[in-house]
């Protein structure tokens, strides 16, 4: 692409990503808490506050792309009123399976659907969702431009698209700590919990290759989204991007 961050052939990239998440699906939620020191909960709650599901019984349907084990959907359902529901779309059946079990034990089974789907080709009609989100997922998608235009396509006019993703630390001092943490602590932690350090090495590297906020915002505009903006969180460790379908 003209953004120049593609380094491995697309098919290989998706295969690597699939292996990583198949091997960690069972332990994915524990790993998330451990590796982010619980911060992913704070970031996801912020995302949900921007998704802003209505508190009353007005119908509101969220599409959570690369939704994995369902975190963002569950939080949105819990924050919203009786009319709020969600669809978790993910390419990985292992992650979705864990998500279905979690939905049942949380009592959300009737309000959330799990669909095996590639973000690049969403199996949903045009203009069918009130909001679309992708959290810590888009950097794994080989053709991010396709994922963005698909999210826009399935949004109703006036609906918002949100992308939560790791970004660039912009606080002096924190950058060195963050680097040491991600390259020295994360792979051994990954090995300890899942027996597989290489997968986590790959994930850390994919974070480094992800475009800076200005560039990603441009990609969102090119996908046809309007009112594009972003908010760095926690010193830029993570960035919340948003855009609207007008
Ligand atoms: N959104 C969840 C969360 O925040 O906990 C899961 C994030 S997990 C880091 C990344 C997810 O992206 C995995 O579940 C993986 O299967 C999914 N994924 C990777 N490539 C995908 C693709 N092309 N289409 C849809 N999902 C994909």
Image: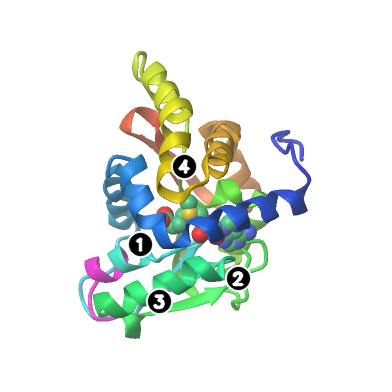
The residue labelled by disc 3 is: 100
State yes or no: discs 4 and 2 in contact (Cβ < 8 Å). Answer: no
Q: Circle 3 — which element?
A: helix
Q: Write down the region rendered in magenta.
A: 76-87
From mark 3 to mark 1, how far is it between C-alphas? 11 Å
Q: Is mark 1 within 8 Å of ligand 1?
A: yes
Report the front residue among 109 and 62.
109
From mark 1 to mark 2, how far is it between C-alphas? 17 Å
Q: Residue at x 58, y 34 (%)?
A: 205
The residue labelled by disc 4 is: 191
The residue labelled by disc 1 is: 71
Say if 208 sits above or below 77 in the image. above
Between circles 4 and 1, the one closer to the viewer is 4
Q: Is residue 108 left or right of residue 162?
A: left
Q: Which mark is residue 117?
A: 2
The percent position of residue 183, horizontal first and vertical second, equals: 48, 27
The percent position of residue 71, horizontal first and vertical second, equals: 35, 62
Q: Is residue 135 visible?
A: no
Q: Is mark 2 within 8 Å of ligand 1?
A: yes
Q: Residue at x 28, y 63 (%)?
A: 75
From mark 4 to mark 2, how far is it between C-alphas? 29 Å
Q: Circle 4 — which element?
A: helix
Q: Circle 2 — which element?
A: loop
Q: Return the disc, 3 or 2, that comes first in the chain's sequence.
A: 3
The percent position of residue 156, horizontal first and vertical second, equals: 50, 70
Q: How many marks?
A: 4
Between circles 3 and 1, the one closer to the viewer is 3
Q: Is residue 76 visible?
A: yes
From mark 3 to mark 2, how far is it between C-alphas? 15 Å
């Amino acid at each position: 692409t003209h953004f120049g961050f593609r380094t491995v052939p697309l098919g290989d990239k998706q295969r690597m990503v699939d292996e990583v998440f198949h091997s960690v699906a069972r332990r994915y939620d524990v790993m998330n808490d451990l590796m982010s020191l619980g911060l992913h909960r704070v970031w996801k709650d912020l995302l949900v506050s921007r998704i802003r599901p209505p508190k009353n019984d007005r119908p509101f349907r969220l599409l959570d792309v690369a939704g994995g084990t369902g975190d963002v959907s569950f939080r949105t359902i819990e924050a919203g009123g009786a009319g709020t529901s969600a669809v978790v779309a993910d390419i990985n059946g292992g992650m979705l399976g864990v998500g279905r079990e979690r939905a049942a034990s949380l009592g959300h089974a009737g309000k959330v659907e799990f669909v095996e789907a590639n973000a690049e080709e969403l199996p949903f009609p045009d203009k069918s969702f009130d909001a679309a989100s992708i959290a810590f997922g888009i950097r794994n998608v080989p053709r991010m431009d396709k994922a963005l235009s698909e999210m826009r396509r399935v949004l109703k006019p006036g609906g918002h698209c949100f992308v939560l993703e790791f970004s660039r630390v912009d606080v002096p001092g924190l950058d060195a700590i963050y680097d040491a943490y991600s390259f020295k602590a994360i792979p051994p932690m990954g090995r300890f919990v899942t027996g597989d350090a290489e997968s986590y090495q790959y994930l850390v590297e994919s974070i480094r290759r992800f475009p800076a906020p200005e560039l990603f915002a441009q990609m969102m505009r090119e996908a046809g989204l309007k009112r594009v903006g972003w908010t760095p969180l926690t010193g830029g460790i993570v960035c919340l991007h948003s855009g609207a379908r007008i």
